[in-house]
Amino acid sequence: MQHNKVLILDFGSQYTQLIARRVRELNIYCEIHPFNKIPSDSDSFKAVVLSGSPNSVRGEEVLHPDLSNIRGKKPMLAVCYGAQYLAHFSGGEVAESNTREYGRANLGFVKEDEAFFENISEGSQVWMSHSDTIKKLPTGGTLLASTADVENAAYKIEGEDTYAIQFHPEVYHTTDGKQLLENFLVRIARLNQDWTPNAFVDETVDVLKAQLGNDKVVLGLSGGVDSSVAAMLLHKAIGENLYCIFVNNGLLRKNEFTDVLKQYEGMGLNVKGVDASARFLEALAGKSDPEEKRKTIGAMFIEVFDDEAHLIKDVKWLAQGTIYPDVIESVSATGGPSATIKSHHNVGGLPDFMKLKVVEPLKALFKDEVRRVGASMNMDKGLLGRHPFPGPGLAIRILGDLTPEKVRILQEVDAVFINNLRSWNLYDKVWQAGAILLPVNSVGVMGDERTYEKCVALRAVESTDGMTADWVNLPYEFLQKTSNEIINKVKGVNRVVYDISSKPPATIEWE
């Protein structure tokens, strides 16, 4: 089935992925591409969105897209920088704003009988984020909406299906943002809303059958959402020809290796558990630098995985749970405008000695879409709702060097914290939670005796995608009970603290 496609040209905005997620929420397929790398098959896209940017159209580093095959030929929505770009280079005027226009604003004027603003009224809240402003509309521009401080908040260009706005419809603070995107994509661009989880499963299974035939595929399961959903899609397509390997690196949560292995076997997957914990911990002995720990774990995983893959006769494919944000950020790293904060282990990271072709059934999906696809295949809600867990596991939650005793301590602390979140019905209200073992000892008193033992930090954040996150205001009673339980039950810990840092400026993990 040929879906409608929306092309999102990325000018480096922190919100570009949010635009794509909002479009996908409307059950419309879209792709993000750097503004200077427009796909050669641009004719297959039925509408185009220009993103915002930290750059200025008045600066020396102006980002110039080639819109010759787009403008006036396809419906186009220009957001923030895009709106200013169209104005500045098409007979309008963009100037530095007298006041930096950031944050909430309200539409004070909305042009009547305009399809673009259907079901959106005056007073609707929007979110501004720019230091330039459009003083004069481009040639053919018609004003559609204003706020108290921004006269040209929205406009269209007569004779074209070209619309432009100086606010961000993709952020939650713009209360009618989803409605505005729907008006543009469904009413104006006339796109079908046919990008659904069920359609994705049916089409992906058909593609995988054709792509893989009777070939054998090996997949490294992590216990997380992405690899599990990828496994189920492949299982539907090729059944027993999928060989799943679940490696215990000794840095998983308490009892996670046996618990998750049982869960996978209950799903009908052809899965082998490999306990390589001793190999990993031996390789990590004496290493305290976080990047060195990550690299050691990555190299050791490939070693173990390759050993196991060689035991499978005639395997031809390696399956990976790569998802769309990994792909976008890897493109950015090779020349796109968006900044990359860290590299991704599962994009382009295979060593030469693994002569396998790669299959990535989830590479078009965002994390929330992966969960919806899993739900449409009736996968266990508990598995689909699992918090993200770092690839290096507890290694980056033990600050400093690793020892088996430190791993034991943190596993016990983490188990108390996570189990209490579940029993207090708080687990599903948290995006990610975990404990961090700090490289400090503190003085304490237990049973009239002086102790000098470890300090642990608890971390719980709320987020939609992990790009930004805020600490969760857990009930004092919960924190009190959890702290008492950790100190009383986990030998080696005498102090518990709670991390109340947001991202940014902090990150979710400590290393």
Image (cartoon, rainbow, N blue to C red):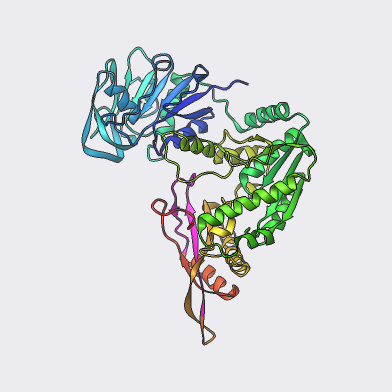
Q: Is residue 262 visible?
A: no
Image location of residue 378, percent across then percent down: 68, 41
Asked whether, in this view, residue 232 is left or right of residue 290, the answer is right
Image location of residue 444, percent across then percent down: 48, 80
Question: Is residue 456 on the magenta stretch?
Answer: yes
Question: Is residue 59 on the magenta stretch?
Answer: no
Specify the farthest residue to the top: 159
Asked whether, in this view, residue 150 is left or right of residue 334, the answer is left
Instruction: Examine the image and state in which quarter residue 238 appears.
Output: top right
Image location of residue 38, percent across then percent down: 46, 23
**In the rendered image of this protein, does residue 245 appear above or below residue 496?**
above
Image quarter hosting the N terminus: top right
Q: Is residue 458 visible?
A: yes
Frontmost residue, 305 versus 212: 305
Instruction: Examine the image and state in which quarter residue 210 appears.
Output: top right
Specify the farthest residue to the bottom: 448
**In the rendered image of this protein, does residue 64 appear above or below residue 426?**
above
Image location of residue 83, percent across then percent down: 33, 26
Asked whether, in this view, residue 406 is left or right of residue 215, the answer is left
Q: Residue at x 61, y 36 (%)?
A: 362
Q: Which residues are magenta?
A: 452-475
Frontmost residue, 189 versus 328: 328
Give the total of numbered labels: 0
Q: Residue at x 49, y 55 (%)?
A: 509
Q: Residue at x 39, y 19 (%)?
A: 67
**In the rendered image of this protein, does residue 346 appear above or below residue 237?**
below
